[in-house]
Image (cartoon, rainbow, N blue to C red):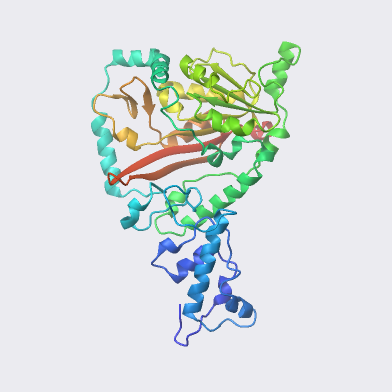
């Protein structure tokens, strides 16, 4: 970057470029210097350069002074990631300063410095080893007569699970509103839009790192506003329901203008993080259901449960003949978080079809579940495989492991538009045992089309 005359040519081309891009130019061998997720532009670095950029393309290059200024701006950029907070060292009790999804492992020697790394690319050897492990643990299948029992008694196995573990097994999913801001009404997502913009910047910066282009290409996200999708359209399902009943039928949450359903709520590890926010938003209502009676009872007995803002009920989504306590076409959001994987693959499509009918035009199904070759799949022993990529645990509960293509096909066949469909590769680290664990999840957002969109 430094010429023989000691001057810095072409600096005008750097004005307005992301700071991370400049740092990468300064230190091409140090990807750790790349700033991810900031919208900071090169407007202050260095002041001497910018002050004279309009008059000439070269200025005196003073390495010690420039490096000092770069260090100051680097600290200021970190502060911008956490408004109101000053820069601090990464401590075990402090949240990371990097935005969600931007902790990238660039130096394998530093793998044990954090508990989790994002967007980890598998080597060919790791993929081959995972594929071989799955072939081995799926070679011996569960006997057909045993498989019938696991299907017919599925609710009993989950009910026993919650009787045993109560609400102590899973952690609360406090990350839901970050990953799925659609859970909130549109006028409550102003702050979330800023976070989404930061995430867009992360993806753009990741695409500049060699080897990350193909991974970032997996993301398919639409920027179409949801408010336009839902609020400006008539709802034929609700209109038909009103005509049949002869009057506006009253049901739990009938007076709400924004309704969310979580399918397979379990002990409420998603319900209460969402309810804590929704109950402060007028016109919002949350439904949650599970086919395990013990799970529903755990939700209803929770101190934060309120019938004024939430309705928990027992329901088997695999039984298409069962009615919901609300009419079709009345929901804005349906949550499917680690639920579809517990259903037999032959019944998944019917479940997605039925849930899509519950949505308003423009409503969305938000999905997250186990991905193919997740560490959970690799840990199954021989004799626990029910069918291809479908396993049963020792307690009788089951798990399927999806690919991105399978999810696309399933929701597309149900008439929903894909707004996001990505494979989330992460590396969990056990620093005490010096272990590295690959986690794979599939996450998607699928929208019910508007009437005029369907016609077109």
Considering only vertical position in the picture, is 456 above or below 22? above
Asked if residue 132 is positioned above or below residue 80 in the image, the reply reads above
Horizontal and vertical percent for residue 338?
45, 30
Viewer-proximal residue among 297 and 2: 297
Residue 141: where, in percent of width, then height? 26, 23
Q: In which quadrant of the rendered view does residue 46 lie? A: bottom right
Left/right of residue 285 with respect to residue 368 in the rendered view: right
Residue 226: image location, x then y, percent? 65, 38
Kindly tell me whether residue 394 is visible in this rendering.
yes
Name the side, left or right, on which 342 lies relative to 17.
left
Q: Where is residue 376 in the image (x, y as percent from the top left)?
A: 34, 34
Task: Locate residue 128 relative to residue 156 in the image: left or right.
Answer: left
Judge whether 365 appears above or below 29 on screen: above
Is 110 located above or below residue 297 in the figure?
A: below
For this rendering, which residue is in front, 412 or 27?
27
Toward which corner of the image does residue 440 lie, by quadrant? Answer: top left
Q: Please indicate, yes or no, whether residue 317 appears anywhere in the rendered image.
A: no
């Amino acid at each position: 970057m430094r010429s023989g005359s000691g001057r810095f040519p072409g600096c005008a081309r750097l004005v307005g470029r992301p700071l991370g891009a400049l740092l990468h130019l300064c230190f091409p061998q140090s990807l750790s210097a790349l700033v991810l997720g900031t919208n900071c532009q090169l407007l202050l670095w260095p002041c001497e350069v910018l002050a004279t950029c309009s008059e000439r393309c070269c200025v005196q290059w003073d390495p010690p002074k420039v490096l000092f200024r770069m260090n100051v701006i680097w600290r200021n950029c970190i502060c911008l990631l956490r408004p109101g907070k000053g820069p601090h060292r990464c401590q075990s009790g402090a949240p990371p300063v990097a935005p969600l999804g931007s902790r990238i492992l660039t130096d394998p020697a530093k793998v044990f410095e954090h508990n989790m790394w994002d967007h980890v690319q598998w080597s060919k050897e790791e993929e081959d080893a995972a594929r071989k492990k799955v072939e081995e643990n799926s070679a011996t299948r569960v006997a057909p007569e045993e498989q019938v029992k696991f299907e017919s008694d599925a609710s009993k196995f989950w009910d026993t699970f919650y009787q045993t573990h109560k609400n102590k097994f899973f952690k609360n999913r406090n990350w839901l509103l970050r990953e799925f801001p659609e859970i909130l009404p549109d006028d409550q997502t102003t702050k979330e839009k800023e976070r989404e913009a930061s995430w867009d910047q992360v993806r753009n910066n990741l695409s500049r790192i060699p080897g990350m282009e193909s991974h970032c290409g997996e993301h398919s996200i639409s920027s179409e506003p949801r408010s336009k999708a839902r609020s400006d359209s008539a709802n034929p399902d609700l209109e038909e329901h009103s005509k049949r009943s002869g009057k506006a039928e009253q049901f739990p949450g009938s007076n709400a203008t924004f309704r969310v359903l979580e399918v397979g709520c379990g002990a409420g590890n998603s319900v209460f993080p969402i309810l804590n926010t929704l109950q402060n938003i007028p016109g919002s209502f949350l439904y949650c259901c599970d086919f395990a009676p013990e799970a529903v009872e755990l939700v209803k007995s929770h101190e934060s449960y309120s019938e004024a803002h939430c309705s928990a009920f027992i329901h088997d989504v695999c039984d298409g003949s069962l009615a919901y306590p609300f009419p079709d076409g009345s929901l804005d959001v349906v949550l499917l978080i680690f639920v579809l994987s517990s259903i037999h693959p032959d019944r998944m499509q019917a479940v997605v079809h039925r849930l899509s009918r519950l949505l308003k035009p423009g409503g969305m199904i938000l999905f997250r579940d186990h991905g193919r070759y997740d560490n959970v799949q690799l840990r199954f022993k021989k004799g626990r495989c029910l069918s291809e990529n479908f396993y049963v645990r020792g307690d009788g509960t089951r798990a399927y492991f999806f690919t991105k293509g399978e999810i696309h096909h399933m929701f597309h066949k149900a008439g929903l538009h894909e707004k996001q469909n990505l494979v989330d590769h992460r590396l969990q680290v056990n620093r005490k045992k010096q272990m590295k664990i690959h986690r794979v999840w599939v996450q998607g957002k699928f929208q019910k089309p508007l009437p005029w969109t369907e016609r077109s």
